[in-house]
Amino acid sequence: MPASTFLLILGGLIGTAAGLMSLWRARSTPRAVAAAGSLALLSLALAAARWSPLMPIGSALHLRPLWQATIGVWWLLGAMTSTTVLRYTLGHDSRSRQSRLVSDLLSAGAYLGAMLAFLSFALQLPLSGLVATSGIVAVVLGLALQSTLADLFSGIAVGIEQPFRLGDRISIGDRIEGTVSQINWRSIRISTDDDDVAVVPNSAVAKSEIVNRSFPARRRGAAIEVEAVSSAAPERVQALVEHALLLVPAISDHPRSGVHLTRLGRRFNRYSVHFFVDDPTTLGGAKSDFLRLVRSRLLHADLLELPPSPSRRETRDALASLELFRDLSDEQMRILRLGTERRQLRSGDLLFAQGDVDTSLYVVEEGVLEVRRLHEGGRLEIGGRLGAGEYIGEIGLLTGAAKQVSTVAIAPTSVQIVRKEALEPLIRDTPRLADLLEASVKRGYALLRHDAAVDPARAAHGMIDLLPSIRAFFGLQGRSAVPADEDRS
């Protein structure tokens, strides 16, 4: 063989070794480029020497070791090139790297084929005996690894069908639900809502019912049944249930929730409620909040049948149910009701606008109010919703300050308006009421400043300078019904 050809082959081997070293640490894209370049360089060297990886070398026995080494490197490099390109083609993001069962199997097949080709073409070994021996070994291993092989082939079947991907929220059967965190040869790992990791074998996954909560969207629906006394008009019950749905922040407005009468009975009528949440992790909390709120609305409207209780009348009274007025006597409550008026709002009606000045407390008797705040630049912020038994306006009532938010009815709503003149004598006679109102004002200002969730103590401390003006507004300087330690709490 000419010296130039020998040097060309030797240079091809050296270049291939450098390419293999770069492949060892390279990322996906540089790895594919390096593999293809090294393979091309070695192929050119073989072509120049008139050597083929698919043909025996012939009579040049003194070159057999070099030829065998070169052909072995060529097949190894070919397997590395094909597997690198294959993995890059199937997926090169973080999700694909955690779920590459199919690509691993194809890569293993590529390396196995390269090894058999090297044994056949370079070493010229008969493969029939090897195949027969490997068949016996495969039978022994198959009997010893039945469960592992079942998981392996089940994983292949699941990987081909792809009912879920890494990061999807799925439920398997009726016991396991969570986010897929890893997919490997034997099992999948699911991060549950309880901050646990469930390891489910692929064979169990293939046999179970799989529900993908993330496809085609993460939105998830739920159906709940609600009962109300049969004497109640279905339209009224449906309206109250819709009010409860509007008050749960996790429940999505689109698509709209539905309330349908499904059964008529002698004592109770049954209603089916269907709603959606945008995040599946909030579904449990949304169900709990909805059931609590719908019970409160039906109880307040006297549409639930409960055992007799002395407190039932109070819990159905919008004013008496407020924590603010729990300490008032029956006579004081009577005086308070005489000083209130009721306003009916249709959906879309404005209760008060941002910037208005009044000294009234607004108590929601029935319906839903939405609190809105318009920022500079025209950005509209939804601050929350109020339902029956909740109130707003305590800041203006106690300080005379202008409204910092607007309040709009988003359903037919009934509101009781408590004027400052009706509360003033009660506050003078019940100093504890003044302290409760002051605490309510602190919370209201903290929410407006968005500090409540960060540092409630700091938000309350910032209100200390405002309390003297509140007391002066009602002529209560120097009076406090709560000891100093309790007031600071």
Image (cartoon, rainbow, N blue to C red):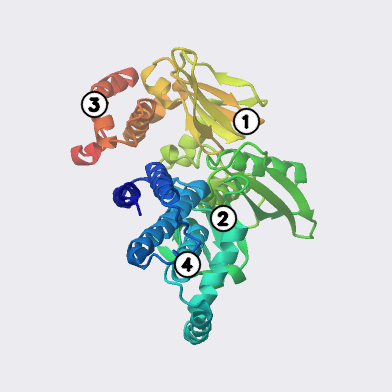
Residue in front for this viewpoint, 56 or 177: 56
Name the mark on residue 464.
3
Q: CA distance from mark 4 to mark 2?
A: 43 Å
**Residues marked 2 and 3 touching at CB (< 8 Å):** no
Pointer 4 residue:
121
Badge 4 amino acid: Phe
Q: Earlier in the sequence, mark 2 or mark 3?
A: 2
Please tell me which residue is depicted at 42% across the width and 22% down the height of the picture.
397
Pointer 2 residue:
164
Please tell me which residue is depicted at 73% across the width and 56% down the height of the picture.
270
- Report the mark closest to the observer, 3 or 4: 4
Badge 1 amino acid: Ser
Badge 3 amino acid: Ile
Q: Earlier in the sequence, mark 3 or mark 1?
A: 1
- Circle 2: is it few (<14), some (14-19), or many (20+) Cα within 10 Å? some
* Residue 5 in picture, x, y percent from top left: 35, 49
Q: Earlier in the sequence, mark 3 or mark 4?
A: 4
Helix, strand or loop at disc 3? helix
Name the mark on residue 414.
1
* Residue 112 in picture, x, y percent from top left: 47, 67
Q: Is residue 23 visible?
A: no
